[in-house]
């Protein structure tokens, strides 16, 4: 449920997507083409694409690297403890789909979010996008603060780092209220 709408939403929002599966690559590609969603993905990696596969985090991190993405701005969606283990080892948030390929209870599987289907996943992803936007904004503010400090001859050694971060967060808080 909701897969098609979610894929279209991702494409409309310029969100890059790849497939990380333990099926052989050619089988995964054939399946994605058969169900007419292959063109939504920039890269497909199967169990035979690299010398390793899930739960080895390199299966995921190499895909992100090949797609020229940032692992710190990556989310994994999956339906098994193998997927969960991969995401956890790679240090990325994980959205667990209920009723996947597992005999474990969902409470026994690592996840940041639990969903029944793809309906509403866009809201979860959007929260991460907003978070990453504000982190980038705060980094810019910190650079501006550093430039101002330098121009008025106040050197970073005289300003506590945590105060600079507090100021940046306050500016971001004010900006987000508007």
Image (spheres, helix red, strand yellow):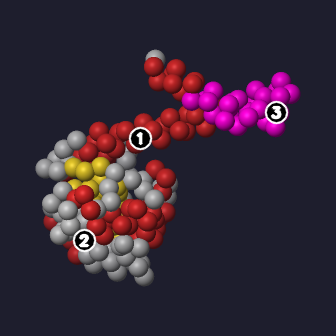
- Structural crowding at the residue carrying mark 2, measured as other residues with C-alpha within 10 Å and reported as few (<14), some (14–19) or many (≥20): many
* Earlier-in-chain disc, 1 versus 3: 1
Is label 1 in contact with label 2 (beta carbons under 8 Å)?
no
Q: Quadrant of residue 49?
A: bottom left
Nearest the camera: 45 or 116? Answer: 116
Specify the label residue 129 is tagged with: 1
- Structural crowding at the residue carrying mark 3, measured as other residues with C-alpha within 10 Å and reported as few (<14), some (14–19) or many (≥20): few
Q: Residue furthest left?
A: 1
Measure the alpha-carbon separation of dots 1 and 2. Answer: 28 Å
Q: In the image, what residue occupies the spot 19% across and 44% down?
A: 119
Q: Is residue 47 above or below residue 168?
A: below
Specify the label residue 158 is tagged with: 3
* Residue 6 image point, x, y percent: 24, 46
Measure the alpha-carbon separation of dots 1 and 3. Answer: 34 Å
Q: Which range of residues does the magenta coloring cover? A: 142-169
**Observer able to see residue 37:** no
Q: State left or right for residue 81 relative to residue 152.
A: left
- Check disc 2 and report the residue beneath it: 28
Q: Is residue 159 magenta?
A: yes
Q: Nearer the viewer, mark 1 or mark 2?
A: 1
Helix or strand or loop: what does disc 1 sit on? helix
Q: In the image, what residue occupies the spot 42% across and 36% down?
A: 130
Q: In the image, what residue occupies the spot 46% across and 50% down?
A: 73
* Earlier-in-chain disc, 3 versus 2: 2
Nearest the camera: 68 or 171? Answer: 171
Q: In the image, what residue occupies the spot 55% across and 34% down?
A: 137
What is the chief secondary structure element of the magenta stretch? helix
């Amino acid at each position: 449920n909701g897969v098609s709408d979610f894929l279209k939403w991702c494409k409309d929002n310029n969100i890059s997507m790849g497939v990380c599966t333990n099926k052989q690559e050619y089988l995964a590609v054939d399946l994605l083409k058969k169900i007419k969603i292959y063109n939504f993905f920039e890269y497909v990696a199967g169990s035979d694409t690299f010398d390793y596969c899930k739960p080895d985090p390199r299966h995921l991190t190499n895909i992100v690297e090949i797609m020229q993405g940032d692992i710190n701005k990556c989310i994994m969606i999956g339906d098994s403890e193998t997927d969960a283990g991969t995401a956890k080892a790679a240090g990325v948030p994980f959205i667990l789909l209920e009723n996947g390929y597992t005999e474990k209870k969902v409470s026994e599987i690592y996840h940041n979010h639990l969903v029944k289907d793809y309906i509403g996943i866009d809201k979860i992803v959007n929260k991460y996008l907003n978070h990453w936007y504000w982190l980038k904004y705060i980094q810019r503010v910190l650079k501006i603060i550093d430039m101002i400090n330098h121009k008025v001859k106040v050197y970073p050694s005289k300003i506590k780092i945590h105060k600079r971060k507090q100021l940046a967060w306050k500016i971001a808080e004010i900006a987000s209220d508007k």
